[in-house]
Amino acid sequence: MNIFKREMRANLKSLIIWSIAMAVLIGAGMGKFASTESASADMVALLNAMPESLKVIFGIGNFDISKAIGFYGIMYLYIIIMGAVHAAMLGAGIISKEERDKTTEFLIVKPIKRSKIIVYKFLAAFVNVVIVNIVTFAVSYYMVSIFMQDQDFLGQISMMMFGLLMVQLIFLSIGMAFAAINKNSKKAPVYATYIILVAFLVDVIVQMNNWLSFLAFLTPFQYFSAESIINEGTLSVGYTILSVIIIAVMLIIAYRRYEKRDLMV
């Protein structure tokens, strides 16, 4: 349990920074909606005139941007990317930082198995991810409620936050797996970031080419679409199950590899 507390303290500053960054992103985005609300018809015409490729890159789907929840749907892509980056960097760093900071010897001489070390590290990372998710949910609900006081949108926000959490956990587990596998502690966060970039590029390619829709399973950014959540009020059960499988497999890899890994002292 001391390892859990140690990791929570070590990541406190990063947790605060990422939470504030999420709040600022949402606040600034919804502030932009306030400034364009009166010109929504012109905005719709402008967005419709944009090339399809730009719409995909900027996350502009079939949203009713005259409503705050529709405008929030456009922002969701940026929110989910930020959540993925934070989770991947956290997952990679929480495993590899002992070698990076030359504290491996201090950790492994303690009377505790490696299996418990990685479990406590995962729990600390999980709590960090959940806190960022809760902050994102609270700020999102508050900002959207300013413009939709008499409308029910809690279910839509809740489903999007569930999707965000799944994507966060996917990249957290991927980051941990890469850190456990890779012998170079400095490369794990870089590789985790590459995975996010590749996933985003696949997302863009799939959206721009309908005939490649069968490749959607390759990118977590396709699993929980703000468009389907807002317009249809649904979450994909299949992608939810796939997310759980990916998380479980990555965590098992991280667990097994960390137990057998030659740690650099």
Image: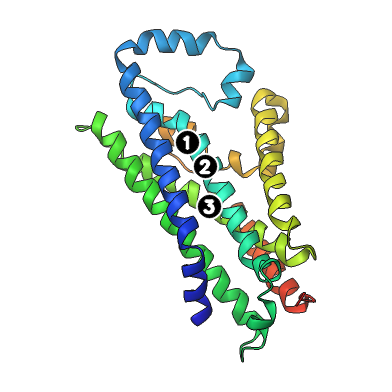
Q: x, y percentage for residue 2?
A: 49, 81
Tell me if residue 241 can be seen. Answer: no
Say the numbered circle drawn on residue 166: 3
Q: Earlier in the sequence, mark 2 or mark 3?
A: 2
Q: Amino acid at mark 2?
A: Ile
Of tags 2 and 3, which is closer to the observer? 2
**Crowdedness of circle 1 by 10 Å Cα count: few (<14), some, many (20+)?**
many
Residue furthest toward the front?
A: 102
Q: Amino acid at mark 1?
A: Tyr
Which residue position holds label 2? Answer: 80
Which picture quadrant has residue 253?
bottom right
Residue furthest toward the bottom?
A: 111
Q: x, y percentage for residue 155?
A: 34, 43
Q: Are marks 2 and 1 in contact (CB under 8 Å)?
A: yes
Which residue position holds label 1? Answer: 76
Q: In what element is the residue under mark 1?
A: helix
Of tags 1 and 3, which is closer to the observer? 1
Which colour assignment does the render follow? rainbow
Q: In what element is the residue under mark 2?
A: helix
Tell me if residue 86 can be seen. Answer: yes
Q: Residue at 59% x, 47% y: name it.
A: 85
Q: Residue at 60% x, 19% y: name it.
A: 54
Left or right, residue 190 beside residue 229: right
Say the numbered circle drawn on residue 50: none
